[in-house]
Image (tube, rainbow, N blue to C red):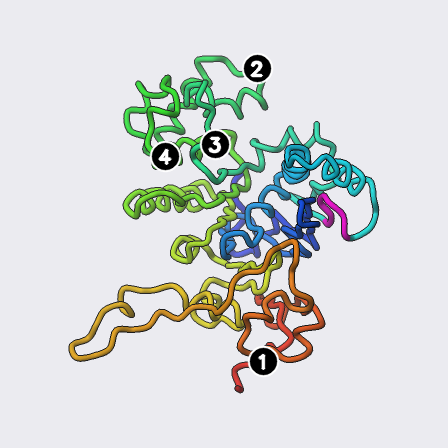
Amino acid sequence: MKPEGIVASLPKAEILAVRNLKAYYASKKGLVRAVDDVSFMVREGECVGLLGESGCGKTSLALAIMGFFERVARYAAGTSGDPTLRKEFDKGMKGVTPDRPGVQGSVYFRGVDLTKLPEEEFVKLRGRELSMIPQGLGHALNPMYSIGMQTGEPVEIHDEHVRLIQLKRKVLEYLGLVSLADAGTRFVMDPGSFSGGEAQRILIAMSLISGPYLVIADEPTSALDVTIQRQILNVLRMIRDEFDVALFVISHDAGVVAELADRVAVMYAGRIMEFGTAVQMFHHPDHPYTKGLMASFPTIAMMRMKAGGKRPVLRGIRGYPPDLSDVPRGCPFHPRCDFVVDRCRSEIPEYREVEPEHWIRCHRWGEIEQE
């Protein structure tokens, strides 16, 4: 377990600070700007949600923070079937130009810049102080090993002197903590013997067992039915409240983010368009994309038909998200924006703090409400 938390009356310190982060990779279509000049921070013990459409770069951001992005990008270039892509990737990695494959910018975790950390040093904190619940239950667990062995692996890696009986007790403790049924007898079984919801619980236990300060949860409730989603959300809330672990929750489901997050970042085409408190984002959004995104989610109340009334129409955002290898010039959202002006088509908006705890990337902030 980590040391006791700071006094509640004092402002909580930053545990993760991302500064001007870029994560690009090579593809047959060209350079894909998966993460493009992203900045935000997570404080101790809080939950920050990242909300956005599928394909906007959310998982790439998580991989860049964890130090996996360049490895994945190099593998994608090498297995693409195009031999020139790997050469271009390796050539770009050695370059100093801003438009090149790889990760640029800074990721500070507890004051240490992870992007400049040697891999052997990164391995010492990855899984112990900083952990991730990956997306995709089908390939997140190794089918060849028992779930008990995999759950205890982070402890074995970071504590080579741990005794087998101690490790088994700790594995059972954490599998019980996430409410895995019959953990005492089922920990020797392989992942194929568990349902999707149970596999997600196992991954959560694996991410917690070494006592991290920050857990990144990438789509923690995807492919699960609503009943299991509620159970997983309760487990994540328990992590935040009882363990005082900071959470960075990534999702395209606004309900999941609204349930857990203290502050919310909205991502589009590799950039964070707006970042503020959960109340601000869900009740008083200012960016046109955030407004459209929030209006796209149906609620039970709005879908009910009143006697003699008309069926409510679900509003959406016109058009389609851009290809990250061919992002529009200027503001990436301008082809779909109802408030676009000439400046939006030619100039990338500055990411600025317009109010305390409220950042936005929009030329027309403060003007739209007057229209």
Q: Position of residue 260 (x, y in %)?
A: 42, 53
For image coordinates 25% across by 73% down, the residue present is: 311
Crowding around mark 2 (Cα neighbors within 10 Å: few <14, some 14 to 19, many 20+) is few
For label 3, the SS is helix
Crowding around mark 4 (Cα neighbors within 10 Å: few <14, some 14 to 19, many 20+) is many
Q: Which of 358/32 is in front?
A: 32
Left or right: 33 as drawn, with respect to 282: right
Which image quadrant for residue 300? bottom left
Q: Which mark is residue 178?
A: 4
Q: How far apart in space, not on screen, are marks 3 and 1 (Cα)?
A: 44 Å
Crowding around mark 1 (Cα neighbors within 10 Å: few <14, some 14 to 19, many 20+) is few
Amino acid on which disc 4 is placed: Val
Which image quadrant for residue 125? top right
Image: 135 above or below 48: above
| Residue at numbered disc 2 | 161
For label 4, the SS is loop
Query: Where does the magenta region start and end?
Result: 99-105
For label 2, the SS is loop
Left or right: 156 as drawn, with respect to 361: left
Amino acid on which disc 2 is placed: His
Left or right: 16 as drawn, with respect to 280: right
Q: Which of 100/273 is in front?
A: 100
Q: How far apart in space, not on screen, are marks 2 and 3 (Cα)?
A: 27 Å
| Residue at numbered disc 1 | 366
Q: Which of 362/159 is in front?
A: 362
For label 1, the SS is loop
From the viewer's perspective, is the residue at label 2 or at label 1 nearer?
A: 1
Q: How far apart in space, not on screen, are marks 4 and 2 (Cα)?
A: 26 Å
From the viewer's perspective, is the residue at label 4 or at label 2 nearer?
A: 4
From the viewer's perspective, is the residue at label 2 or at label 3 nearer?
A: 3
Q: Residue furthest left?
A: 307
Looking at the image, is mark 3 or mark 4 earlier in the sequence?
Answer: 3
